[in-house]
Image (spheres, rainbow, N blue to C red):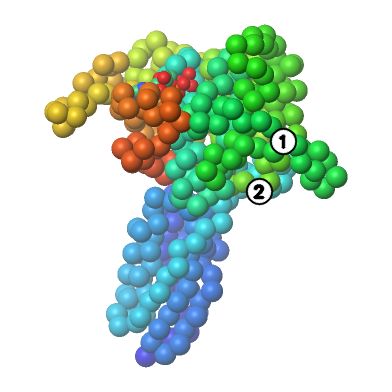
Amino acid sequence: MSFSKEDVLNALRHVDDPDLHKDLVTLGMIEDIKTEGNTLSFSVCLTTPACPLKEHIETACRNAIAHFIGEDIDVKILMTSRVSSSKKTTAMLPKVMNIIAVASGKGGVGKSTVSAGLASVLSKSGAKVGLMDADIYGPSIPILFGVQDAIIEMELVEGKELMKPVMAGDIKVFSIGFLSKPNEAIVWRGPMVSSALKQFMNGVNWGELDYLIVDLPPGTGDVQLTLVQNLPITGAVIVTTPQKLAVADAIKACAMFTMPAVNVPVLGIVENMAFFEPSDQPGKRYHIFGSGGAKSLAEQFNTPVLGSLPIKPELVQDGDEGKILNAENVKFFTEIAGQLVRQIAIANAHQ
Ligand code: ADP
């Protein structure tokens, strides 16, 4: 059987990206088509290595080739990725594709835990990830990764002296905690935060990153407002527990991001401590903090719930021991990260 590259493209024009609602050929995702006799190979270049639809898209491509060209073709598909970028971010930091702010209305709802978990699974998927701990009230990221004793080194980059991020595995970490002594109280005001944060952006050698996750301080005061107005944020993730009190504060956080002067899209809600499932009663869920709060918040701001994280006492110990990502937690964070990267790709396609 003989077929041309054009035949392949015509077949793949019938495969849509489920999120971007356009076909893979129009989106420029099909690369390196090679045909020889009965064999065909090509690459599908996705918008992120963490794409949860990878297998679905690959199967759809195989089905289209079989249906429109022939069943007996030997097809090899290489699934690759080039992370899509946010114009807002790359204008200021050309080598950083996306800055994702993780925020909450209230402290203690698990914002840092979620930031660390997301950074870890995105990095494991093959993405280049940075994690900036901007939680001036309680910088806990260094502890979660066991790098609290790191000493910041300087390095010369293109004639500029920059601070070297601390490596936690493959993740580049920088924390406001690295610059202050433990137990040293710093009273931050809006303008101080914005100038410190600008230093974090421009004074740290972040290099090339697909995702820079920023763990913001909780709340919606002057400090937070200054911060979100000054960072070129691609989008925000709001963490809440199902508790009414937490959701009431999360509404304020969503409102802050969506106010016209800020105009940062809320990419989704993460519901933390959603339920407790005792290990000796699988399937039995106790909704200790109530239920439905994240869903109603998401509906109010026309944004998805990216996922739910159960109450896991091991998370506290793992966090304290600098091992945020154990096998049990990976599955929850992977699901949340998968939904998040889909929302980022959609936001970038529509800018
Ligand atoms: P925040 O950044 O919102 O202040 P943290 O991520 O520091 O919150 O979490 C607060 C505390 O709650 C930490 O001790 C953390 O280990 C714990 N924690 C967070 N999420 C969970 C969870 N799903 N199950 C159990 N403990 C959790």
Q: Left of 228 or right of it: where is 9?
A: left
The residue that appears at 42% across and 90% down in the rendered structure is: 37
- Ligand 1: give its quadrant: top left
From the top left corner, tell me how far across and down residue 296 is, in percent. 36, 23
Quadrant the C terminus occupies: top right
Q: Left of 286 or right of it: where is 136?
A: right
From the top left corner, tell me how far across and down residue 45 is, in percent. 51, 62
Q: Left of 286 or right of it: where is 337?
A: right
Q: Pick the residue in front: 5 or 166.
A: 166
Residue type at tag 1? Glu
CB at disc 2 and ligand 1 closer than 8 Å: no
Residue type at tag 2? Glu
CB at disc 1 and ligand 1 closer than 8 Å: no
The residue that appears at 64% across and 25% down in the rendered structure is: 178
Where 37 sits versus 275, above or below? below
Q: Which of the two discs, 1 and 2, labels the residue nearer the N terminus?
A: 1
Q: Which residue is mark 1?
A: 153
Q: Which residue is mark 2?
A: 208
Q: Nearer the viewer, mark 1 or mark 2?
A: 1
Q: CA distance from mark 1 to mark 2?
A: 19 Å
Quadrant the N terminus occupies: bottom left
Where 162 sits versus 28, above or below? above
The residue that appears at 51% across and 26% down in the rendered structure is: 143
From the top left corner, tell me how far across and down residue 83 is, in percent. 56, 52
